[in-house]
Image (cartoon, rainbow, N blue to C red):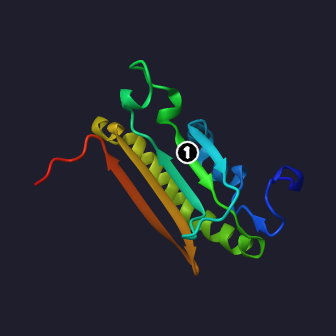
Amino acid sequence: MPARNRRLPRHLSWPLTPTDLRAVLGEPLMDEVSLIFFGQPWHDGTLLQVSRNGLTTSNYGYSTFSPAWSRLSIGIVPLPAGERAHARGVLRAQALPELRDWADRLRRAPETRALTSHSASWRVTGHGVARREDDQCYPPAEPG
């Protein structure tokens, strides 16, 4: 992304570009993606975040579904510019293939999973990545 379009302080840089995502995810999956470039680093070191909201009529009015609710939302979080090259290499080699597999599993999941919101995030740890996944069931699971 050109510096004039960055909206970031000079000492920060995004570790991935839309081209990086497109190369791994492919055009068909990129059509289902809402891409967000965050402006500040996250306190937990997350660099890549993806989420998908479950389809329920309560999260969109008039008993209809907005196409945006079924889209993947991918967020890229900035980091210090000096760490970009290392983080980019690790994210492209490890996190993006995991993201593609995560999205493919979600698209092929049973219908009941469509009512569940899902998210995952990745951060660089040395020469690898750490992934965290969160699923939120609606309605809440029955106790016991």
Q: Is mark 1 on a helix, strand or loop?
A: strand
Q: What residue is pinned by disc 1?
A: 73
Q: How many marks?
A: 1
Q: Is residue 4 left or right of residue 25?
A: right
Q: Is residue 102 left or right of residue 68?
A: left
The location of residue 9, given as percent across then percent down, is: 81, 63
Name the quadrant containing residue 14: bottom right
The location of residue 86, given as percent across then percent down, is: 69, 75
Picture residue at 64% right of the left edge, 60% below the top: 77
Q: What residue type is labelled 1?
A: Ser
Work out whether residue 105 or residue 123 is closer to the camera in this orientation and state it: 123
Query: Does residue 86 appear in this view?
Result: yes
Picture residue at 86% right of the left edge, 53% below the top: 2
- Image quadrant holding the C terminus, namely bottom left
Residue 60, compared with residue 41, is above or below; it is: above
Picture residue at 52% right of the left edge, 52% below the top: 50
Residue 74, compared with residue 132, is above or below; it is: above
Picture residue at 28% right of the left edge, 37% below the top: 112
Q: Is residue 138 left or right of residue 83?
A: left
Query: Does residue 105 appear in this view?
Result: no
Taking the view exactly as shown, the residue that stands out farthest to the top is 62
The location of residue 109, given as percent across then percent down, is: 34, 42
Name the quadrant containing residue 20: bottom right
